[in-house]
Image (spheres, rainbow, N blue to C red):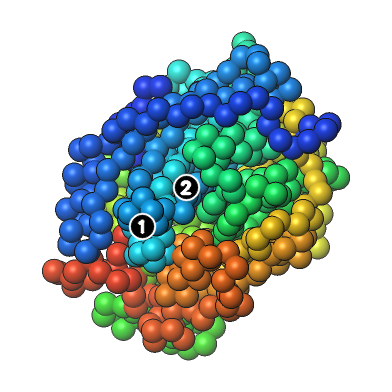
Amino acid sequence: MSKPVFRTVAALAALLVSTLAVGIPAASGAPPGEAPKISWSPCYKKLATEINADMAMLGQPEVSYECASVPVPLDYDQPNGPTIRLSLVRLPASGPEAERIGSLFVNPGGPGGSGVDFAVFFGPFAGLELGEQVRESFDIIGMDPRGVGRSSALKCFGNVGKAVEVFPWAAYPISPEEIEAQIAGDALLAEACASGTKRPSEHMSTANVARDLDLLREAVGDAGLNYLGLSYGSFLGTVYANLFPDNVRAMVIDGVLDPVAWTNEKAELPFSTELRSDLGAGAALQKFFELCDATPGDGGDGSCLISDGTAGDAAARFEAIIERLEDSPLEVFDPFVGETFVLAQQDVIAITLSILYNPFDYYFLGELLAFVEAGAPPADMGAFLRELETETALVSKRGFPQYDNFVEAFPAVGCSDTRNPTDYAVWQDTGIADPDPYFAKIWDWASSPCAQWPREDEDRYDGGFGADTPSQVLVIGNLYDPATRYEGAVTVSELLGNAHLLTVDDPGHTSLGINSFCAGEATGDYLIDPDESLPDFCPGLEDAVGLNWIDLGSPPPDGDEPTGLRVADQLRHRLLPEISYMP
């Protein structure tokens, strides 16, 4: 980034309205020891009151939340040894007890995303997105994974000001000076997290989170796990299905990471390169160009301001913008801090990638590119970027209202799960033959902290991934996902012994809130009955309802009721901060 204030990423501190007080084992994947007892108590009462006003308008059941803090083994090799605590929230099923199926555990991804925040915001809307019977039949439970958020959290810094010092000024490095700054930031993070015991940093692999999940499944009294995992949460689901295949009742993984690429046993390239998310982002950008050319910029609502309607115009103008910024970055006056910065080529690529996660925001991407193309004055550019943050729910790293430990949690999980080179020359030149011209470098460098990360988890899971579960696993992949590309869903569906692949013809990261009319409905039907016959393909928005994403994403008229797709739009903006696996 040109300056940290414009390093736009999904706001991982979206909730933060309150806090809670609070390898494969040699013989078996089963976690030893007895399941903990969970004592639930009411929580988030004020927030529930606010949400219930929306629920009444939407004709949905009232919500009330219950929270708990549960001890689990720090190290499953020592089941009677030290413990850490997991923070949980539960939204009880709205239907009669006699019709209750069980608990639905949800994980939003990250790694480092808060399952508590996700359950609090998603749970009330589950009936709209997945069908009323899901809301009636399941307690929806979110867990902050070990080391994350409100659970016993790994914290290497005293406050957010110290934490963000690990981020260099460039969104990703190109010049020697920027690369030097990136390496220095990684070293600062490694040094801060190496000092002291830093529990539970050596026990934060996905395999240990899966073991926690199985203990909690037993603790809530479910014979089989019901699970919805998004983005990185798909890897958690895949690992659980392979560690505890007989304990799966229903599992949905949406926005799927290729587990072989993620674990990256060869370690010849960074794991973030092996995932080839750059190709997924490139496909999403091309889809945006196609939508943009179909809704040319005539100045009215719903028009794409970076195309004249000629096929290929949006792509050509984007290429020209990026080339011009390489030598001539824009000056930006940020009214929030009263300082002038520059908007560089890397910044526009990073912001573009962020917006590609959510097709509801594609209209705003056209606006952004039009501002940059026109060389808007510094004050106008700064005011627009601040407005963009509000409209798209994006904030800068410095925008965190309080210290969130995503800075440490992402590498503590990601670097524990994966193998990576230690020579930064590989990050500078990966040697892949077909890099995406815009997004390869930002995804390459997403994993650079792993080059110096000082901790390992001996109990990480490194494969295989072919377990056969009693019920089919529902694997959902968007054709144009800019983070977890569609090929990851195909790979997992082929690796697992009993899986069903659902292909979604839409852009964006995960299908949740994007394709409720098909993928959402199929997910709900499956959770109720895992033997349900499922579709193989879900049409996109245009084929289903005749709307272009850019037209839909334009600002609604005053007084427009938040129903239907407008509710999905609002839900996506609330949930993306937790779903995002993003550099």
Q: Is residue 43 above or below residue 223?
A: above
User: Dot 2: few (<14), some (14–19), or many (≥20) neighbours within 10 Å?
Assistant: many
Report the front residue among 420 and 37: 37
SS at badge 2? strand
Identify the residue at horizontal 61%, vertical 14% (top origin): 82
Q: Is residue 319 above or below residue 186?
A: below
Work out which residue is located at the far top of the displayed protein and give it: 196
Residue where numbered disc 2 is placed? 103
Report the front residue among 362 and 564: 564
Find the distance from the CA under tag 1 to the CA under tag 2. 11 Å
User: x, y (%) of residue 570?
Assistant: 31, 60
Residue where numbered disc 1 is placed? 136
Left or right: 236 as drawn, with respect to 515:
right
Q: Is residue 10 above or below residue 376?
A: above
Say which amino acid is labelled 1: Glu
Identify the residue at horizontal 18%, vertical 44% (top origin): 49
Work out which residue is located at the far left of the displayed protein and give it: 559
- The reply to whether residue 177 is visible in this rendering is no
Dot 1 and dot 2 residues touching (CB under 8 Å): no
User: On residue 185, which mark appears?
Assistant: none
Q: Is residue 547 above or below residue 522?
A: below
Report the front residue among 347 and 10: 10
SS at badge 1? helix
Q: Quadrant of residue 159?
A: top left
Identify the residue at horizontal 58%, vertical 18% (top origin): 83
User: x, y (%) of residue 166?
Assistant: 55, 30
